[in-house]
Image (spheres, helix red, strand yellow):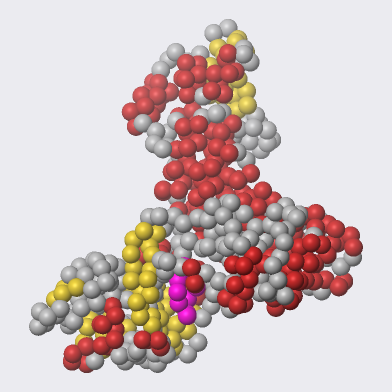
Amino acid sequence: MELSAGLLRDIGKLYYEANDYNVQLTVGGEDESIEKETFKAHSVILRARSSYFQNLFSNDQIKKDGEWFTFEKQSIHPDVFRLLLDLKEPDMQDLFIPLLLSADEMLLIDLVKYIQSHIIENEQSWLHENFVHIFHVTTTHSTTFSLLANHCSRLICENPSQLFGTPSFIRLGRCSLLTIIKRDDLDLSEVDIWKYLLQWAINQYPSLNSSGDADSWTKKDFMELENRLKDFLPYVRFFQIPGDKLYEFVWPFKKILPKKLKAQLTQFHMMPNTELPPLGISYNLSLRLPKHQIDSLYVTSKHAGMLNAWINKGENGLKNRDKVDFQLLLRGSRDGMDIKTFHDLCDNKGPTFVLVKVLVIETSDSFIFSFANSDTCEQDEYILSRVQNSRYAIRDMSCKLNNIGFGHDLWWFSGSCTQQYYEKKILPPNSGSTFIMDDYEVFQVTNSREEHYVEENESISWTEVKNSKEELSNEQLFNASVKNLAAADTFNESDGSVLNIGEDTKSFKSEDNSLESEVLVL
């Protein structure tokens, strides 16, 4: 949504140059520390641009004193009202939320849409820094903020660490949290969702018994916990929690679960071949399907989401509108660790994969990176290094040295990592420049703008739930149904994994002109 530049310019001239104002608006004063301020405006512009003022004028709720209409609004800060009255593009980040709230109160619908679009498109860093607060405001205040609320919801589902586990998480409102728990694409295991819900409920005011031992809880404690979580329980996929995790983290609080649910959970895990009757209460049995999935032994869907952002030139996972799909082409431990297998399985796989028999490949879009062995994607747990000298970005020395790599910065078959043509060294500090490759994976990367969300009424049968039990216990529930998978190359070094990826689309020929392909090197 864009405001017309011509409209802004013309109205701005009226505000600064006209001498026929007929409205005096006094705002501020609700807080004693903020002085009131009076503005002049045109009634015709206020009527035309705001249904709020249109209603006030039509119902004679704005008093007329001589030649002037007078209006007072204590709840709006003068700085915010000045921006509203100017109808200029907001340029003060600390006023974005007050401006959004005030524009909504004044029924300036176009401006509300414009501010939301401006934040999404141009204020990624500010959005990241104030993420939890923005999500809370947009999901609890007004349905007119749905554009920004839905954007935040998608980001949380793709990268839950932006909300879950943050200091602000326990202060999140019930409505906001429920919005996320209902989603089928939330990229958290079901047992982690349960643990976060417990943390949130226990820390609401007044806080409950914080003891980790539920045996010390009183009947009153359990009753209060049940009251705080009753709206969330139908959206927890209890049947997707492995039996050992269910016993360890859910069963100590089983007193808050409906009797029929407890009985069927017990039957589900103790008598897997018994057909269970429908639940008396509508519990969600559909599988959660994260947007970014990866058929990898070494990285998770969280890493896949980060890879998606890096491929789209985003650094913090916030700006990744173009979804990419990944298809596993090769796994060294499964298909072979030699260069011939690498070429046999990865050549000629499409225009997004570059891998040919040349000495040097020039590209400006390659990058290499490393992840620690961790389920999280915090900034101190990965190293991202983009190419600086594109002439030596990708090097294939298969014929002469039986090796292939990215500059001198990563030769994965020989296990060498010397920073030269990329921004930084990707091995951990003080780890030297060599490593032993334990395994590696190659994925084809393809663009896909299609968003995958499970429909709210989509569910699976009891038989499908039962058949998935073994996969659930191994935390591989979704691998069997994945059609488009995620991307990375993996190389282990002690307790870490070194990975790399490139994204240029070009055709190259080998020195003897025997091979030409359009594939992406991983």
Give the residue at x 57% y 76%: 471
Q: Main secondary structure of the magenta part?
A: loop
Residue 317: percent from the left, percent from the top? 45, 62
Do we see residue 193 in this rendering? Answer: no
Q: Quadrant of residue 362?
A: bottom left
Q: How many marks?
A: 0
Name, please, the residue furthest toward the right: 219
> In the image as oriented, which residue stretches furthest toward the left?
512
Q: 91 above or below 271?
A: above
Tell me the residue at 37%/71% (across/down). 327
- Is residue 470 positioned above or below 61 on the image? below
User: Is residue 210 in the magenta section?
Assistant: no
Query: Quadrant location of the C terminus?
Result: bottom left
Q: Is residue 228 left or right of residue 132?
A: right
Q: Is residue 298 magenta?
A: yes
In x, y percent, where is residue 404?
26, 85
Residue 425: quarter of image:
bottom left
Left or right placement of residue 372 versus residue 516 in this view:
right
- Residue 500: x and y in percent read 36, 76
- Whether 271 is drawn above or below 6: the answer is below
The magenta region covers 293-301
Q: Residue at x 68, y 74 (%)?
A: 273
| Position of residue 513 measured from the top left corner of the image (x, y, whole percent) | 10, 79
Observer able to see residue 154: yes
Quarter holding the N terminus?
A: top left
Q: 73 or 263, which is in the foreground?
A: 263
Whether residue 161 sits left or right of residue 12 in the image: it is right
| Residue nearest the viewer, comparing 188 with 30 | 188
